[in-house]
Image (tube, rainbow, N blue to C red):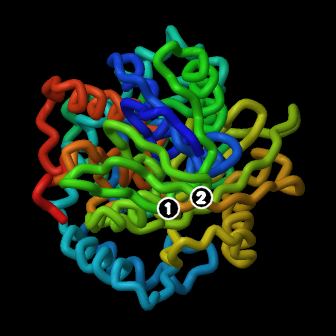
Amino acid sequence: MQQKEHQVVVIGGGVVGLTTAWWLVEAGFRVALLERAPDVGNGASYRNGGQLSYRYVSPLADAGVPWKALRWMFQDAGPLRFRPEADLRQWRWLAQFLANCNAASNRHTTVKLLELGEHSRRMMARLESVVPLAEFGWRDAGKLVVYRSKALFEAAIAKPDPENNRRVLTGTETAALEPALAQLAPRLAGGIFNAGEAVADCHAFCVALERRLLAHPRFDGILHAEATMLFEENGKITAVQTDSGWVTGEHFVLAAGIQSRTLAATAGIKLPLYPLKGYSLTAPIGPEHTAPDISVTDFERKTLYARIGRQLRVAAMVDMVGENTTLNPRRVAGLARLVRETMPTAADYSRIEPWAGLRPATPNSAPLLGPTRHGNLWLNVGHGPLGFTFACGTAALLADLMAGQPPPFPLDFLAWPTNNR
């Protein structure tokens, strides 16, 4: 591969990599994108839950989660599956995750993620003049979190609501607001509705943004090749090796999902990332169906429901099984059974299309961005299940950092320590 030296090479063509490339070209950089798949948005961005939850963020690590996890692992449609690996990275990540499983850490992380979510919401709104919302099925649907347990519902409404944005509903009021929940209403303790949350098609967003990038005068194009190694010389990264040759540049940005973990290791950096395998089901909605208009989260089942165009998207589950995207028939069947029980008339379940993808998560559920100890290697990684939600925000923050501009708020633990190996 004979390539001219690029000013910035962004590695990863999912929603995080594409938004990063866009904000960098808008900031004045010349950018090339490196993506291993033939098309953009075909990894974790392809059929994710589609929810843009700017005001509702819930870090996976919390008090009581380890005990709940033991129970979940014995349920076919349970939120968690765990398979031990002979891989030190899994056990190191688990140890760090368990250290974050307390109320204080959860509150600390939640505050920062809410700040990042609000910034991301503003950055997505800024894109509207470039990428019309209709191109990727964006809807201001609002978000409804439903609770089956009275104790969990009371704990949720006891949490502060500084923006006074939420509506607290009884089980009956919850079903009245969203008729698709009528079957579930007798088992609901209540619900919490937040306006201003959205749903959209993440893959369609990636394709729409790709078109704008290809037309941008400072975009050098997409190089479809798999990155295999970062080449370091005198404390800086000078090139990335691919299966088609070397690509050189002045700066390199890792935004390649879980692949970023392996690439960073070739430059001596151990990223605390683990692939949380998530599932989704997509089913068509006909005129006879009663699909939800509001984005719904079933809190105890950890299941998300979103109407995206004429399709119902259901996303759920965390499988800790390494870098394995194979569909597990039992998990798919368990999720399909849960969906039919919860919203029996929401879509044509005879035509379900299952999907699984790897969500690159940090132990505290907060993404990592900024420079590394190599002055020209930058990170935008670790978004977990909130990649679509946070992509515009972290892309804008990284562009500010690379342009020498201060971020609009303290990054704190979002920033990667430059002395950290």
Q: Quadrant of the N terminus?
A: top right
**Amino acid type, callout 1:** Thr
Q: Earlier in the sequence, mark 1 or mark 2?
A: 1
Point out residue 51 in the picture as x, y percentages from the top left corner.
52, 40
Taking depth in this image into account, of 108 and 187 the one nearest to the observer is 108
Q: Is residue 218 above or below residue 234?
A: above
- The answer to which quarter of the image holds residue 93 is bottom left
Residue shown at 33% from the left, 73% from the top:
65
Residue 226 appears anywhere in the view: yes
The 10 Å Cα crowd at callout 1, few under 14, some 14 to 19, many 20 or more, is some
Residue shown at 28% from the left, 34% from the top:
398
- The answer to which quarter of the image holds residue 60 is bottom left
Residue 159 appears anywhere in the view: no
Residue shown at 45% from the left, 25% from the top:
22
> Residue 268, labelled with which disc?
none
Point out residue 58 in the picture as x, y percentages from the top left corner.
34, 52
Taking depth in this image into account, of 191 and 103 the one nearest to the observer is 103
**Amino acid type, callout 2:** Asp
- Of all residues shown, which one is farthest toward the top? 129
Measured Cα–Cα span from mark 1 to mark 2: 7 Å
> Residue 228, labelled with which disc?
1
Q: Quadrant of the C terminus?
A: bottom left
Taking depth in this image into account, of 415 and 317 the one nearest to the observer is 415
- The answer to which quarter of the image holds residue 352 is bottom right
Is 421 situated left or right of 237 in this image?
Answer: left
Secondary element type, mark 2: loop
Q: Quick check: marks 1 and 2 in contact, CB under 8 Å?
A: yes
Secondary element type, mark 1: strand
Is 220 situated left or right of 251 in this image?
Answer: right
- The residue that label 2 is drawn on is 243
The 10 Å Cα crowd at callout 2, few under 14, some 14 to 19, many 20 or more, is few
Point out residue 83 in the picture as x, y percentages from the top left corner.
50, 86
